[in-house]
Image: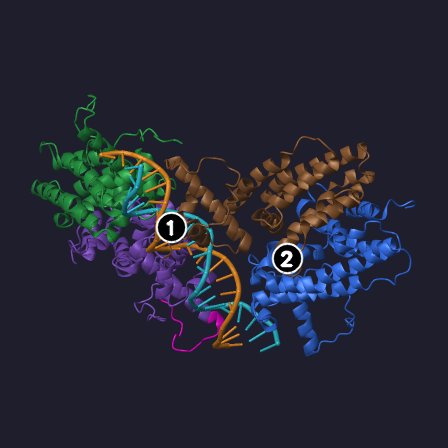
Chain colours: A brown, B blue, C purple, D green, E cyan, F orange
DNA sequence: CATGAATGAGCATTCATTCAT
DNA sequence: AATGAATGAATGCTCATTCAT
């Protein structure tokens, strides 16, 4: 019935950040295919986040993407590989962006605060945050997804945090030396914030930015000047 | 063929802590019914944890519980309410146990360490830890579960932690006064440990106990004597 | 809608020859299951014969058998194994009957005529004849069916015919000694008759009985008295 | 990837016997179209023989023919009419060849042996033999194919055989006068040989040539000289 | 109460056919 | 003419739920 349901008008997770001149018609074959594929990925992510892998219907994805059901199979082998590729496609640019840290000028705390700011803006409370929860939810049934996520995001993030922590210790900004062994502690409140937004936001709103600040105070000692 | 698969011999999550006289033969009607119900809950939890709500088949639950499929419907209205009741049934005794804190003798750090010890033993890396991940996974599709979990576990846990933090601040054990506004920070590494066990244990084992100790050092200042 | 579509009233291929007292109610669980299974086999055979394996819809089989689609899967793993088992179930009793030849009294020609008479009555122009054509049609795609058919029917039939031919040669009834090397020649017109009925009956009716008689005249020499 | 799979290099069934000057470049529009059509027919026959009508995918035909899927629809209305036309196109030249019998010099047996030799070389164990089996398989679902096959092949073949048999009877070569009423008996072993090759060759190889010789011995009396 | 055979709505996937390029 | 991306009806199979025994 409703052929083109306005194509998920919300800000695209997939394309955000791309700088290609979308204004131009640019409707050659390859472009159209890429657009459709992106629409499918976008729609699939919405549905998977909202319902989980097993409960998501390809019919709904197709409808939301504005394509026919069969079209999905022109781009993905089956539902499972769609899910797996989807995670890759969405995660990779985020990682790329987050790991492009500003040059190490200023204090370690400044660096970490910049990182946290990015995270707050790009992940917490966004579709991407929901995706993190989705990975937590489906990881055990999709080892390849868990593997990918560990390899591309977690291990890198842990390594980056460890490097910063060691720098902070060397410069005397961080007192607790054992922290370098558990960079997870540095990240934990941010992860909790992500999950909290998904599950409990309506029960008790959480000021993630303020919480992260308090957490950094705990690690670096309270700041004299805000 | 394999009709009665010996009912998942592992330590029951459901009954631990119950004090009903199981020793007695007690094969009256009511007892038998209660046993069956417990077996179903136990089996359902295993299956839901392993596959998620949507992908779990009642057939498998019945087989694991050693009952017929129809029997499940004598105890639960349908799959959804089974899941919802299941979470209640499993969560309640855990909460009861965790909140039965020892009397506030000794330092606040000692109290929190006792709590963390319990958590390490009873939750992290156990079936109950998996249940937490399951709630994170299915929460958005089961508002009643998320509501229940928030009300019974999260809000209580947060309140309890806040009380302890305030006590610690009052006694001078904790320096960071803002921490009382975000007890989540205190709990975050424990939650991360729970999730880490489920998803990344095989990629990189995590010494949760040691990590929690480091985290407490961060909050209370390093301990002079271990 | 049409719940019980009168269950293919035609003479059952599956049960024909059984002498169980169907008059009795006899509706215990096992009996009912066997009846349903038989109904499915019956219906499946009709559909497979009429449309071939690939073009047959399980929906139609179910409707014709008077059961729900899911019921089929209580009895057969999938469409393929249903087809394979079906051939076995239908073929076996036919083989049993045909190989129960009358005791070798009288001439070899009498024996073979008795056999041909059976074949005319039980196979040519019947559902079972159609099944033979179906096996010819689907054999290449179902090696297991071709294997089974060769092992249970063809090799036995060839061996039995060879024994009769050798007996006929020994007794001087058959002159052509090389015939023992190709019992297929003896059977060939009967097979042609089977196929002719399926394909060309409406173009040119074939008196199979008379044709087989002429063929035997060819082999044994013309009969003096019919 | 493998766009043009070199077009099934084996001897073409479709073109064999054609005398068009393929050597010339001859790339005008009409010729190119005819070549494509021939490639499609060739590919379609391979696929239909291998999988049967219903299980054959146009995709596979197109790939094998080295054309795009849509191109098939420039030559054929749909899958059904492609199958129907295909049978015509392939059968006609075979019939033409087989019915071009050598002038009736020598004995009737010689004529029939010449015919059998042709059949052995051109049909039994070849792609065309498979096509016969395909017609047997799909005939009931394609009355037009069965009609065509009966009209063009079967009725002509039967008439030709009958003429030969009557000649043989008249000349005293054939004793069994009733044979003229059932020319099918003359052809039956050849048909059985065709089917045997398709289905049971790997179970028990059949020397078709020798079998046909024995069959002729049966009809004509054993030959004095080989 | 307990059972498990039976049901049928629901869904992933396929593939003949169309049509814009 | 030729292409192949797109379509969507069709179909095999699953599984939550029911109910006669």
Residue B206 visible to an observer of this rendering: no
Q: Which mark is residue C149?
A: 1
Label 2 – label 1 distance at C-alpha: 67 Å
Looking at the rendered image, the disc whose residue lies closer to the viewer, 2 or 1, is: 2
Front one among B7 and C9: B7
In this image, D196 relative to B79: left or right?
Answer: left
Asked if residue D73 is positioned above or below residue A58 in the image, the reply reads above
Q: Report in which chain the residue with disc 1 lies.
A: C
| Near-viewer residue (A49 or A72) | A49
SS type, badge 2: loop
Residue at horizontal 17 percent and vertical 39 percent from the top:
D92
In x, y percent, where is residue C181? 31, 41
Circle 1 Cα neighbour tier, 10 Å, few/some/many (<14 / 14–19 / ≥20): many
Report in which chain the residue with disc 2 lies.
A
Quadrant into which the N terminus of chain A falls:
bottom left
**Residue at position x 56%, y 70% in the image:** B70
Q: Give the residue drawn at x 88%, y 63%.
A: B103
The residues colored magenta run C17-31
**Farthest residue, direction top:** D24
Q: Picture quarter containing residue B180?
A: bottom right
Q: Residue at x 63, y 48 (%)?
A: A124
Question: Residue B162 colored magenta?
Answer: no
Which residue is identified by label 2? A201
């Amino acid at each position: 019935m409703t052929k083109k349901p306005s194509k998920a008008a919300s800000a695209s997770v997939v394309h955000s950040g791309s700088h290609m001149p979308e204004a131009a018609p640019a409707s050659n074959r390859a472009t159209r295919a890429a657009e459709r594929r992106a629409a499918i990925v976008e729609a699939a992510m919405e549905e998977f986040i909202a319902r989980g892998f097993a409960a998501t219907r390809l019919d709904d994805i197709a409808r939301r993407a504005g394509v026919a059901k069969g079209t999905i199979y022109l781009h993905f082998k089956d539902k499972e590989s769609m899910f797996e590729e989807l995670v890759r496609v969405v995660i990779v640019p985020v990682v790329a962006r987050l790991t492009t840290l500003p040059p190490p000028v200023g204090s370690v705390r400044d660096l970490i605060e910049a990182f946290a700011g990015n995270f707050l803006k790009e992940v917490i409370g966004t579709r991407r945050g929901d995706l993190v929860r989705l990975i937590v939810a489906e990881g055990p049934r999709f080892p390849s997804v868990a593997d990918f996520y560990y390899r591309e995001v977690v291990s890198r993030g842990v390594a980056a945090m460890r490097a910063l922590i060691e720098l902070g210790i060397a410069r005397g900004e961080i007192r607790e030396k054992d922290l370098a062994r558990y960079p997870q502690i540095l990240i934990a409140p941010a992860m909790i914030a992500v999950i909290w937004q998904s599950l409990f936001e309506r029960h008790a709103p959480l000021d993630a930015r303020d919480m992260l600040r308090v957490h950094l105070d705990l690690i670096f000692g309270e700041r004299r000047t805000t």
